[in-house]
Amino acid sequence: MSGKILVIDDEPQIRRVLKTALASHEYVVDDAKSAEDGFIKLRQDRFDLVLLDMNMPGVNGVEACREIRRNSDIAIIMLTVRDAEVDKVDALDAGADDYVTKPFSMPELLARVRSNLRRIPFSSLGEQKTIRFDDIEINLATRHISVDGKDIRFTPKEFDLLYYFATHPGLTIPHTKLLQAVWGPDYSDEIEYLHVFVNQIRKKIEREPGNPRHLLTELRVGYRFVLNP
């Protein structure tokens, strides 16, 4: 797997190490020493993934993530020395697709990069390219979603998660199965990922996110997606 990656971190040594390691695995890598520098590079070039330090001076990682998300659905992995659940939720709420705690091993980071660059194929639907229900349309070929005829921006992982739900309607899907299907085999215990992403999806497709009709919680088990309630 290859891709173009932007590393945004204020520590020169970390930028050097990440650039060298990622380049050795055939990724094209650029770096930025601040969020502001990163914004400029994202406007000037196209990247597939951003590795974003959470604890930078000036515009911090959470603020930078929100700003990137206003204009892009690029994959974002947050890097941080803090490992409290509230910090992880803050990062995911800001629009990050993933979260890695420093210090991390390079094999772990590479696995996370691969997971966030992979996309779920839709070959299981045969020739079907579009899923429609109520006023919602999911275009699998273009990875676009519209509600009431208006395009709604989804992050890559939000799309993959909604796609998985929509192609398994009516089934109660356990947390672990969802995490492994959408993020990969190393994510079985990241239940908070699902809580955050399901809430984000509900806000985008449900008329009453607090009282969902399509994306239902099965308490202590997982979730169930209903196409036509």
Image (spheres, rainbow, N blue to C red):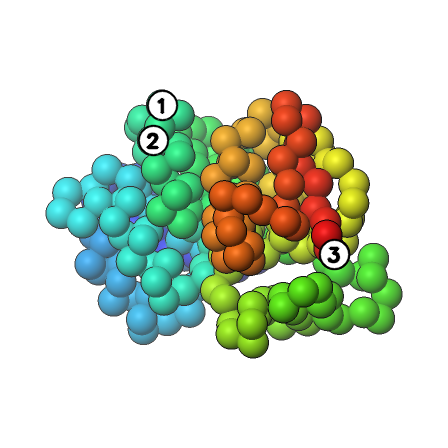
First reached walking from the N terminus: tag 3 or tag 1: 1
Residue 160 visible somewhere in the drawing: yes
| Location of residue 119 (image quadrant) | bottom right
Up the image or down, 150 lies above or below 103; here it is below
Residue 48 visible somewhere in the drawing: no
Q: Which residue is mark 1?
A: 84
Q: Which residue is mark 3?
A: 228
- Residue 87 has which mark? 2
Q: Amino acid at mark 3?
A: Asn
Q: Label 2, label 1: how many angstroms apart (C-alpha)?
A: 5 Å
Tell whether 207 sits left or right of 104: right
Q: Label 3, label 1: how many angstroms apart (C-alpha)?
A: 39 Å
Q: Are marks 2 and 1 in contact (CB under 8 Å)?
A: yes
First reached walking from the N terminus: tag 3 or tag 2: 2
Q: Amino acid at mark 1?
A: Ala
Q: Which residue lies at the image location 56% right of the left edge and 72% below the top edge?
A: 148
Q: Which residue lies at the image location 58% right of the left edge and 46% below the top edge?
A: 212
Q: Which residue is at the far bottom?
A: 149
